[in-house]
Image: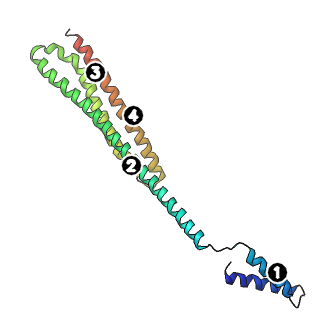
Amino acid sequence: MSTKRFSEQLREIIVDTKANGTEAISCDNLIAYLDEVIASPSDELTTTQFENYKAELQVWIEQNKNAHNSNIEMFKSVISSGQNALRSAFLLNGGAAIAVLAFLGKLSEEHQDKITVFSSSLIIFVMGVLAVTMSSGFTYLSQWLYSSTEQKKKTIGFVFNLVAITLGLSSYGLFIWAMVRAYDAFQLFA
């Protein structure tokens, strides 16, 4: 307890005692009260307690820094994985479309009547490229909206993120579908 607070409290007790009709205070009673105050726990922190509090606060700060850094690294990892998935889908569908086009170029020299058999798989590969390209665009838009402070924009960003994921996954599905169609077309040559 601070000296000022002690003085205020002692003054209040003396004023209350005087208001209750006591003209004089017994020394024994005053000493007993002061002994009680001295024996009571202190409101002020000791140097050891203060240093302990500072150390606990520093530990808490470091834990929060570590958690924040971990969250940032996890976010970077998720973004990197998503970018790699988009690149893979683009390369799969784009590369397959180019391969089918090259094959059709060679096929047009010898078997022009068979070109239409491969057109459906080419269209599906191109749709896969379009889906992954749109997924990339929706990814950008979702991140842009996530950075807003408005909750409505963050919600729209979440929806755009789901659209981007759906388009990315559908590009893989389109690749598989086009591969099956191309396989069936190749079976005509067997």
Which amino acid, by three-letter code, is at mark 4?
A: Thr
Which amino acid, by three-letter code, is at mark 3?
A: Met
Label 1 vs 4, first from the N-terminus: 1
Q: CA distance from mark 3 to mark 2?
A: 37 Å
10 Å crowding of disc 4: few (<14), some (14-19), many (20+) = some
Q: Nearer the viewer, mark 1 or mark 2?
A: 1
- Asked if marks 4 and 2 touch (Cβ < 8 Å), the reply is no
Residue 81 horizontal/vertical position (percent): 34, 40
Residue 20 horizontal/vertical position (percent): 89, 84
Residue indicated by mark 2: 73
Q: 168 or 12: nearer the eye?
A: 12
Q: Nearer the viewer, mark 4 or mark 2?
A: 2
Residue indicated by mark 1: 32
Query: Helix or strand or loop: what does disc 4 sit on?
Result: helix
Label 3 vs 4, first from the N-terminus: 4
Q: CA distance from mark 1 to mark 4?
A: 79 Å
Q: Residue at x 16, y 21 (%)?
A: 103
- Say the numbered circle drawn on residue 166: 4
Query: Helix or strand or loop: what does disc 1 sit on?
Result: helix
Residue indicated by mark 3: 179
Label 4 vs 2, first from the N-terminus: 2
Query: Helix or strand or loop: what does disc 2 sit on?
Result: helix
Q: Residue at x 42, y 50 (%)?
A: 70
Q: Residue at x 53, y 67 (%)?
A: 54
